[in-house]
Amino acid sequence: MKNLIHIAGKEIQEGLRNRWVLATTLLLAALALSMSFLGNAPTGSTIGSNRLDVVIVSLSSLTIFLIPLIALLISHDAVVGEMERGTMLLLLSYPIGRKQVILGKFLGQLTILAFATLFGYGSTAVVLALTGGGIDAASWLALLSLIGSSVLLGAVFIAIGFFASTIVRERSTAAGIAIGIWLLFVLIYDMALLGLLVFDQGQMIGTALLNILLLINPTDAYRLLNFGTGGAGALTGMGGVAGTTTLSAGVLTLALGLWTTIPLGLSVLIFSRKEL
């Protein structure tokens, strides 16, 4: 456990020395604050949603594109990068197991991403609390769920980035895989699924198959978790999709958890048998 914390601390220190990590944190905060100031636009009052519901929709849409990209950027070279620089051999010369290396690095990078998300999106909560606006408890709970699920989505793509980093021997290859993964899950998969649903017209794809197709993509699980109910669902139309599926919040959270543990477990297994 001590070695795990030591490696995580090392990752955090290296992350804090990277200016782009600070820039990412400030970017999230700036975008979140801009969303909060735009949250009193006529859209919310028109359809019966309060300011915070509008902000949640905006931040969720932002998260789907930005958080996976940030997570992949910080994790894709976590293993192969140190192998190329020769620092991995030095690290393993200490009494540290390979499993501890992977888990420690994962914990450190997740801490960095969680801090950036909490600081960025938490600033929205502070602004809305100071300005008031008649926001109910359900909307505040939805914001907390947004922050927690955003960190969990980041954990998914950090784990996927680690998996990519352990199966290749060059950083450039890992970077290419990371970009391909982002394009697949964030853009290509949903366009293909939408086309399939339009073509099928409800003839062959029933509720059970739709559930599976949505769970295959972690960003879709995240969408349903944050857009599926309440005012946010009304603003996006995802409430209708959530009504078609039988996926509860617990199932969606479990799916995101599995999307984290499976790639991370495979990373540990591959790295434990990898020749350096």
Image (cartoon, grey):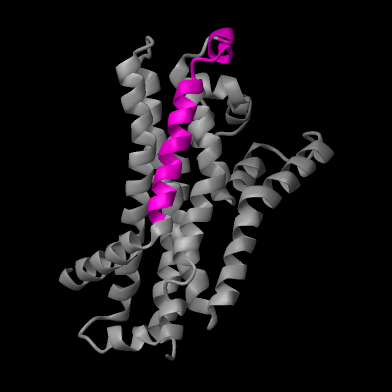
- Chief secondary structure of the magenta portion: helix
Measuring from the top left, give residue 232's x and y in whole percent.
Answer: 52, 24
Q: Quadrant of residue 129?
A: top left
Measuring from the top left, give residue 221's x and y in whole percent.
Answer: 53, 42
Position of 78 with respect to 176 (left or right) is left
| Range shown magenta | 21-47
Is 180 placed above or below 69 here?
below
Is 244 placed above or below 64 here?
above
Q: Quadrant of residue 201?
A: top right
Measuring from the top left, give residue 175's x and y in whole percent.
Answer: 57, 69
**Camera sees residue 247:** no
Inspect the magenta stretch and tell me whether residue 39 lies in it. yes
Is 110 placed above or below 2 here?
above
Inspect the magenta stretch and tell me whether residue 36 lies in it. yes
User: What residue appears at the point 37 percent right and 9 percent down from the top-left corner?
Assistant: 134
Give the farthest residue toward the right.
199
